[in-house]
């Protein structure tokens, strides 16, 4: 009598292995996608922190040197339309003065940044990234017109001039 092998169990075992391998593959791809998304979000936050740090260092380096002029290039992700600077000592931030209706003008759009003027009047922040994701306070800046909004092209270029006590900001 010859012995016969039962091959039906082997086929079921192979199907189980293929299903298990497919599930492991899906889990790895899902985990990898989530990890990449997390790193992209962190990268944007790092660029914003670098933007703030570079701006603060540039203002500190220029403000005490009367007459010194520096061109400062600040990197900003392209999803942001621009940045607005307000001078606390100007009429733009004076709660008793009339509104000046600040705007950010980009090649394709115009953004009303009235909310930034209102925040400046409260003296809680005077530098705003549009769309509003991060506001911060630089008390040692001076703007002749009260405010300036500079559109973003991947790099925001500003002109800093030392006045002895403050840094005068304008568009380069």
Image (cartoon, rainbow, N blue to C red):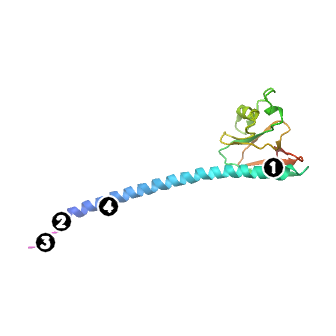
**How far, Cα to Cα, is label 4 from label 1?**
63 Å
Q: Give the dominant element type of the magenta stretch: helix, strand or loop.
A: loop
Cβ–Cβ under 8 Å for marks 4 and 2: no
| Distance of label 4 from label 3 (alpha carbons) | 27 Å
Callout 2–callout 1 Cβ contact below 8 Å: no
In percent of width and height, residue 108 lies at: 70, 38
Please identify, in this view, whether the residue under mark 4 or under mark 1 is nearer the observer.
1
Give the residue drawn at x 86%, y 38%: 144
Q: Within the magenta stretch, is there residue 62? A: no
Q: Nearer the viewer, residue 30 or 45?
A: 45
Residue at horizontal 76 percent and vertical 30 percent from the top = 101
Quadrant where the N terminus sits is bottom left
Nearest-to-viewer mark from 2 and 1: 1
> Separation of disc 2 and disc 1 at Cα?
81 Å
Highlighted magenta segment, given as a residue range: 1-6
- From the viewer's perspective, tell me whether residue 38 is left or right of residue 7: right
Which label lies toward us, 1 or 3? Answer: 1
Q: Kindly state the secondary structure of the residue where label 2 is placed.
A: loop
Q: Earlier in the sequence, mark 4 or mark 3?
A: 3
Residue placed under numbered mark 2 in the picture: 6
Disc 4 and disc 2: Cα gap in Å?
Answer: 18 Å
Q: Which residue is mark 1?
A: 59
Which residue in the structure is indicated by mark 4?
17
- Residue sitting at 65 percent across and 45 percent down? 79
**Number of marks:** 4
Residue ID for mark 3:
3
Locate residue 81, reporting x and y percent.
Answer: 69, 42
User: Which of marks 1 and 4 precedes in the sequence?
Assistant: 4
- Please tell me whether mark 4 sits on a helix, a strand or a loop: helix
Q: Residues within 10 Å of mark 1 (few under 14, many from 20)?
A: many
């Amino acid at each position: 009598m010859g012995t016969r092998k039962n091959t039906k169990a082997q086929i079921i075992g192979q199907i189980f292995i293929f299903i298990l391998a497919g599930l492991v593959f899906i889990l790895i791809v899902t985990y990898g996608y989530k990890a990449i998304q997390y790193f992209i979000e962190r990268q944007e936050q790092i660029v914003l922190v670098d933007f703030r740090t570079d701006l603060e260092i540039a203002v500190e380096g220029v403000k005490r040197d009367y007459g010194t002029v520096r061109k400062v290039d600040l990197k900003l992700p392209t999803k942001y339309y621009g940045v607005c600077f307000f001078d606390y000592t100007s009429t733009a931030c004076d709660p008793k003065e009339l509104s000046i209706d600040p705007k950010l003008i980009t090649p394709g759009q115009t953004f009303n940044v009235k909310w930034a003027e209102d925040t400046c009047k409260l003296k809680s922040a005077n530098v705003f990234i549009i769309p509003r994701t991060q506001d911060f306070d630089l008390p040692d800046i001076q703007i002749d017109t009260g405010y300036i909004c500079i559109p973003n092209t991947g790099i925001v270029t500003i002109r800093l001039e030392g006045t002895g006590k403050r840094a005068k900001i304008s568009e380069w």
